[in-house]
Image (cartoon, grey):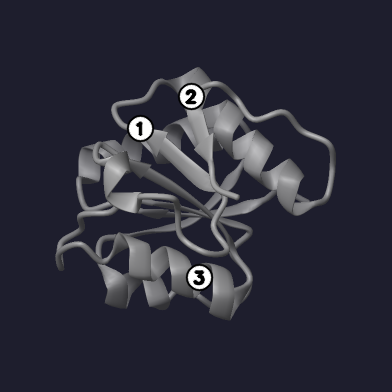
Amino acid sequence: MTASILIVEDEMLVALEMQSILEDHGYQVAGIAVDLESAMTFADGTIDLALVDLNLRDGLTGPQIGKRLASEHNSGVLFITANPLLLGDGVAGTIGVLTKPTDEPSLVSAVTFALRKRQGEPAEAPKALRCFN
């Protein structure tokens, strides 16, 4: 069974690029959300991993979305943002942050790592990913 991934990104070209990369690597993209409200419509417990930007259509709601998906819906969460310092030491329950712009190998290795970590499998974090404790 393939992992289901939610992309939370309001820059549609960036979101579609990520979707294409993930699908090319065999992942199922559950959807693209552009704000808090649309992200929560996907929060039904079937999302294995969410890739969440910080600044979205409704403002700086990414950290809130990530926290809610992780704590209330048991989803894995990776932040992907051009502003990683806004996360400080991280968000409780989330895995880490990848800095945008990113490339295909970095995205795929971060997703692979996050999914393995959620499964309890041994995995080494890719260099491009800053993990939270």
Residue 75 appearing in the image:
yes
Measured from the top left, where is residue 120 in percent x and y? 83, 50
What mark, if any, has residue 69 been given in the picture?
3
Which sits earlier in the primary sequence, circle 1 or circle 3? 3
- The residue most toward the front is 89
Q: Which residue is mark 1?
A: 99
Q: Which residue appears at 28% of the width and 54% of the height?
A: 54
Amino acid type of the residue that numbered disc 2 sits on in the rendered structure: Ala
Q: Which residue appears at 31% of the width and 61% of the height?
A: 62
Q: Which type of secondary structure does the marked residue at label 2 adopt? A: loop
Q: Which residue is mark 2?
A: 128
Which sits earlier in the primary sequence, circle 3 or circle 2? 3
- Judged by depth in the image, the label closer to the viewer, 1 or 3, is 1
Measured from the top left, where is residue 29 in percent x and y? 51, 51
Q: Are marks 2 and 1 in contact (CB under 8 Å)?
A: yes
Q: Which residue appears at 66% of the width and 35% of the height?
A: 112
Q: Which type of secondary structure does the marked residue at label 3 adopt? A: helix
